[in-house]
Amino acid sequence: MSMFIRLNHSLQLQFDAVMTRLAGDYVSKEIYFLEGDELTAIGRPYSIRIRLSDGSRDNDREYEQWEGLDENTIPEIAEDTLRNEVLKYVLMQLRIFYDIRPVADEYMRSVLRGKLNDKLKFYDSLASDEPVVSFTIEGNRASVEDIMIRVFDDSIISDILLDTDLDYARRLMGLLRYDEALEQFLPLVSRVKPGSMLDTELNMYIGEIYYHIHEPARALEYYKLCNPRYIDDIRDLNIRVGHCLLDDKAGLRAGLIKMYYRCILNPTYKKSIIDRYDRLKEQVASIYDEHEARCEEAGAEYLRDR
């Protein structure tokens, strides 16, 4: 498959600026061609083809030689769409790869990638920056064209969220307002595909909340629904599950263990008991590492056998 792309004015100016830096005699016709991981800027006296997977480039046909090119049938990529954000990310990565100023610093690149991935996860997709730009769909390598096809319908995000603000729900967790956070997260579960990236994220949040409000059995119900494909740290998930299984069996110091683990899960909770934290740490020091090792083992076994 392949597609012709007409960029909106703002994005067009930015892409053309990069192309003219790469080839000073290039004149843009304001149309791009995307096939797999190859992006071609169509123009005169030649077009510029870039392989986005490794940054290699060469010259292609000039504008008049492109077959099947009908400018009147090419829709414009609107500014307020996820497709536009994908292309802005590609542009940023090209600037970095070719060292075309201005170049975003590492922190800003991380922020922008994070914001893009916060939306791509609604499509079980992710962006990374190696070697130029790379995408995955459902954990598998995907081309830029695959992603552009995948995110064609932006309404998916609004249909899932409705009146929910995920950032606000996360802040509620950070503020220890767990009941309010649950009210935000729980309705979303029925709107997402089971086992998807977003479903896994929601189950992790909800599981953590139930652990904090002393309902480990409920926490376990949600943790076990997480798809390992979308867990960056499987050891962390195993430990979370293990705490749900074993904490209440830890005898006289079960309460101390649970309090200490809540400090690990949520820095705000730790701050809320900061006057008692040093004493708490002393009380569990002799048993905590061994208990957590058992939690990791029990969690791994439980998830393996589920």
Image (cartoon, rainbow, N blue to C red):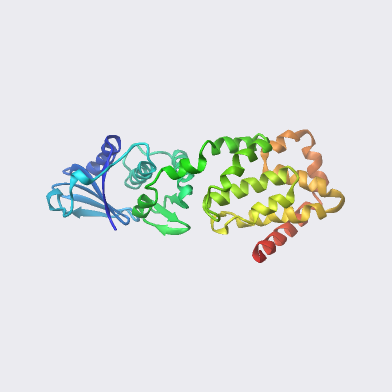
Q: Residue at x 19, y 53 (%)?
A: 59
Q: Residue at x 24, y 44 (%)?
A: 19
| Percent of width and height locating residue 37 | 32, 55
Q: Say which of 233 and 228 sits in front.
A: 228
Q: Say which of 132 and 229 sits in front.
A: 229
Q: Is residue 183 visible in this depiction of the protein?
A: yes
Q: Say which of 289 and 266 sits in front.
A: 266
Image-based side of 166 in relation to 27, left or right: right
| Above or below, comparing residue 58 to residue 154 in the picture | below
| Percent of width and height locating residue 88 | 36, 41
Asked which quadrant contains residue 183, the reply is top right
| Above or below, comparing residue 302 to residue 16 in the picture | below
| Percent of width and height locating residue 209 | 68, 43
Image quarter of the N terminus: bottom left
Asked which quadrant contains residue 260, the reply is top right
Q: Residue at x 75, y 35 (%)?
A: 274
Image-based side of 125 in relation to 229, left or right: left
Q: How many marks?
A: 0
Residue extending farthest to the bottom is 305
Image-based side of 149 in relation to 5, left or right: right
Image-based side of 262 in relation to 225, left or right: right
| Percent of width and height locating residue 296 | 70, 58
Q: Is residue 23 visible in this depiction of the protein?
A: no
Image quarter of the C terminus: bottom right
Q: Say which of 214 and 88 sits in front.
A: 214
